[in-house]
Every structure is written in structure tokens, then in C-alpha cells.
Image (cartoon, grey):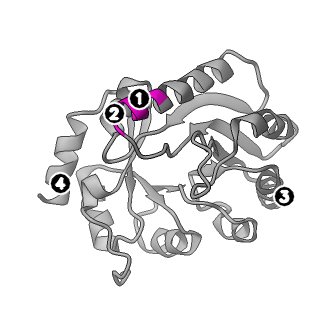
Amino acid sequence: MSIQENLEKIEKNLKDNVILLAVSKTKPSEYIKEAYDFGIRDFGENKVQELIDKEYKLPKDIRWHLIGHLQRNKVKYIVGKVYLIHSLDSIRLLEEIEKRYKAENLIANTLIQINIGKEDSKTGIYLEDLQDLIDVCENCKNVKVKGIMSVIPKGNEESCRNYFKKLKGIFDDLSKKKFKNITMDILSMGMTHDYKIAIEEGSNLVRIGQGIFGERNYDVKKK
């Protein structure tokens, strides 16, 4: 199926309030342009350098999302180029983002990434450390938290649903509290193979790459 056909199929499964984030990592610009021509404006990249390269070449009204782990020494390169940082996962990273964005008098919109399964292979903050991160964020001037994100452990439908329910519970609990710099606007969970379940459990942003662009090719020559 073509990229357009894949998008048409996926959009039939989306609710009106759900944002489709096209995960374009490793994909060449012409693939992104095809999705753009279909009407997609939100694209997700894992690596800072790849995001910067594409941001420079592609239409300026694209909203670029950084969904991969963000190293502190790379923050300076994305200031003013990223619509939403999905991977805020530590106080040290928060402090670096605050410093770099303050220097440019800009606001960084972020999601707190939660490692819900405590997997060593994944980044994200553990639940027991979440409040400490929130406390520091409340003292920031240039970082705003817009919600939470998670990549759940692989599993069957029951397992996926349980993790999604747990994340929705965290999201709802935070939504009831009053913060200065934190709002629960976005619950980013669900990918190609489980996004339908995620939406059923309350996700309002799904990250889909393979379902749109096909199998990843990490050797592709970026254009």
C-alpha cells in the first residue's frame, strides 16, 4: 500500500480529538513530503541531527516532535526548531532545557516520558521519581509540561491495555491538580501495532511510523 493509502486507513480509526504523529525517523524527505501533501503536519524524529537536517529542507509549517532520548549536550541544537519534546525524563535534562531556552527567551513545550515498565532498554522517568521532576518544573520559567508520554513493554492485548489504563490513571490524577507550568493536554501513547487499543484507553496522540511509511530502513540515504 502507498503512504496515502496507509494514512487513509489509519485516519478511519482515529477519533476527532486524536493527533496523528507520523514517525519519520530514518525516512527520506520525499516520504515525508508525500505525507505532508496528504495533510499531515506533525512529524516525529528520534535523533537531533536528523531532525535538524529535515527541518531545514522541508516546509516551515511542519510541527517537528523530538520523540527519542535527548542528550543534554544536544539541547542547544533544537532550540526554536522543535514544536514538542516528548522525552523529558530527568531533572538534569530539565535544567539544561530551561537554561538553553531562557538564553533565547523562548518556551520549550515538553512531555514527561514515563518508563512505565521499568525496562532497562528504555529511557523515561520512574513513577517514584515523577513528583521530584514536577517540583523542579514548577520553578521553571521557560519549560512547560503539556502532558505525558510512554513507550510500553511489548505484550499481548491484555498487557497493553493494562499499561495504557495505568498511564491514563496517572494522566487523570495529574489533571485534577493545579500547577503553574504543567497542564495535562496530551497523553501520548500507542504506536503502529497497538494504537487502536491506546485510543480506546484514552490516548489523544499516537505515534505511527511503520504503519504509514512501511518497514524502517536504517541504511537509507537521507535526501
Q: Which residue is mark 2?
A: 157
The CA distance from mark 3 to mark 2 is 41 Å
- Residue visible at 68% across and 62% down in the picture: 79
Labels 3 and 4: the sequence-earlier one: 4
Labels 4 and 2: the sequence-earlier one: 4
Using the image, tell me which numbered label, if any, was put on residue 161: 1
Main SS class of the magenta portion in the image: helix
SS of the residue under disc 1 = helix
Q: How dense is the environment of label 2, judged by Cα within 10 Å: few (below 14), some, or many (20 and up)?
A: few
The CA distance from mark 1 to mark 3 is 38 Å
The CA distance from mark 4 to mark 1 is 29 Å
Q: The magenta stretch spans which residues?
A: 156-162
Residue 104 vertical placement versus 201 (above, below) = below
> Type of residue at label 2?
Glu
Instruction: Residue 167: give x, y in percent of width and height.
Output: 55, 30
> Type of residue at label 1?
Arg
Nearer the camera: disc 3 or disc 2 = 2
- Residue visible at 59% across and 26% down in the picture: 171
The stretch drawn in magenta includes residue 161? yes
Q: Are marks 1 and 3 in contact (CB under 8 Å)?
A: no
Q: Which residue is mark 3?
A: 99
Q: Are marks 2 and 1 in contact (CB under 8 Å)?
A: yes
Nearer the camera: disc 1 or disc 3 = 1
SS of the residue under disc 3 = helix
Which of the image's four quarters has the C terminus? bottom left
Instruction: Residue 131: give x, y in percent of width and height.
Output: 79, 32
Instruction: Residue 107: give x, y in percent of width and height.
Output: 72, 48
The CA distance from mark 4 to mark 2 is 28 Å
Labels 3 and 2: the sequence-earlier one: 3
- Residue visible at 30% across and 34% down in the picture: 196
Question: Which residue extends farthest top?
Answer: 176
Using the image, tell me which numbered label, if any, was put on residue 4: 4
